[in-house]
Image: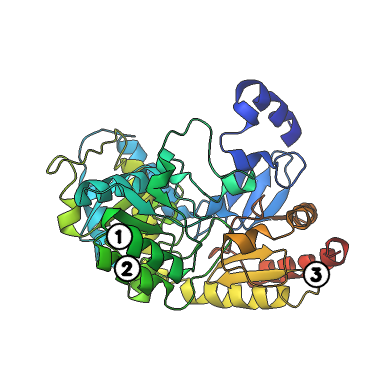
Amino acid sequence: MKSNEWFKRALKVIPGGVNSPVRAFNAVGGGPVYVTKGRGARITTAEGRELIDFCGSWGPLILGHARPEVVDAACAAARDGMTFGINTPREVEFAELLCAQVPSMEQTRLVNSGTEAVMTAVRLARGFTGRRRIIKFAGGYHGHSDGLLVGAGSGLLTGGISSSAGVYVNEGDVFLPNYNDKEAVSRIVNECGDELAAIIVEPVAGNMGLVLPRDGFLEHLRAEADRCGALLIFDEVITGFRFGPTSYGTLKGIAPDLTCLGKIIGGGMPLAAFGGRRDVMQRLSPVGNVYQAGTLSGNPVAVAAGMKTVELLIKENPYPRLAEAGAKMSAKLNQIAGEFHVAQSGGVFTPFFRRDPVRNLDDAKSCDTSAYAAFFRSMLERGFYLPPAQFEAAFISAAHTEHDLDQFAAAAQAVSDGIMV
């Protein structure tokens, strides 16, 4: 069966035919792709067509699809039991590894998704401080829990909405300055600092496309959180272990009070974590009064895949090559004439369809999303799979070759004249 046939079947039994909205291709047009296999940097569609993948399951697959050592580790764990709901030795070893690699995480707890990690981190911050209000940044996406969908990016931004029906939250509890706006943060702290439980931020924004922090921005957040007694939370579900075998905060010498990890640390399995200061983490049940639980938390199969992934990243250190490859490819793309600007850091990039760099949500929303949709479809026709939305980050994996990247740049050049109008 072809992808369009699978989609017709799916529409009858799954709302919108998809289990995550952006997969419906509403932002780029055309029918969604169905995939049957992935190996290295390539995926195979239901039609048997091979595509070079720059989405990488939205970030987890930094080693590429089906890395043999990761698959073997997961399979070995599965043979001993898929889940127990009981403590296992490996979850202790994995927690020790994460804390060793991210020194600001004195303790950590494993959960099943980035949404769950961030939701609990915010609850923990409120429980620890006894305050309710938080600062998050317009266009930042921190999962789909109620209080964090206000002004969110990612799929909500792609769909052209800022929140969701069915969400019942006091929006006055959430301040929404622009990313990179230090002055706005200071104003909020000056006016309401004694009511703030947390400042939460993606240290490198990845859910309105890739947007880098300006010099001093993250340091300013650390200082302002200290000034008012709020906790600083780094949502590193995307950035954790993406630019080095640690967190982005560690690489930049900034210690948040809490860090949320996901995607890469699961090695392709559903696994995430949050952690930070011991005195804060000790407020979690069963030792504290902030409740969190999960039947599948610390699932042995996911932990095995995640631990092997982190071990390989430490051993192989693909990061210098990813950074070099990303810089080289983005330089080629930025030579293409027209309303086209590629943001890049390490192995992460976003082709923004506007001339100037993107610094915040307002800049991102000025992009020509129709041009991106045409670019996406043209690249797909040529055998390259990108995120099917302008406001998402694309990823280079350790499995991509220099030839893959050269082909991508050449294809982008070939289609540019038709979409740069």
Which quadrant holds the N terminus? Answer: top right
Answer yes or no: do the residues labelled 2 and 1 have beta carbons within 8 Å?
Answer: yes
Q: Amino acid at mark 1?
A: Gly
Measuring 45% from the left and 64% from the top, which residue is drawn there? 242
Where, by quadrant of the figure, is residue 36 drawn?
A: top right
Which label is found at residue 380?
none
Image side of residue 249 versus residue 94, left or right:
right
**Amino acid type of the residue that numbered disc 3 sits on in the rendered structure:** Gln
In x, y percent, where is residue 9?
A: 68, 24
Give the residue at the far top of this rendering.
12
Q: Nearer the viewer, residue 295 or 20?
A: 20
State the image coordinates of residue 349 (x, y, percent, origin top left).
60, 66
Give how far apart the Cα atoms at labels 3 and 2 are: 44 Å
The residue that label 2 is drawn on is 224
Residue drawn 29% across and 69% down?
A: 255
Q: Which residue is mark 1?
A: 193
Residue 327 placed where, x, y %?
A: 60, 77
Tag in front: 2 or 1: 1
**Residue 207 drawn at (x, y percent):** 54, 55
**Which mark sits nearer the N-terminus, 2 or 1?**
1
Report the amino acid beneath label 2: Glu
Question: Could you tell me if the residues under marks 3 and 2 are in contact, i.e. CB atoms within 8 Å?
Answer: no
Real-space Cα distance between discs 2 and 1? 9 Å
Name the N-terminal-most of marks 3 and 2. Answer: 2
Residue beneath disc 3: 413
Considering the numbered disc 2 on the image, is that residue within a helix, a strand or a loop?
helix
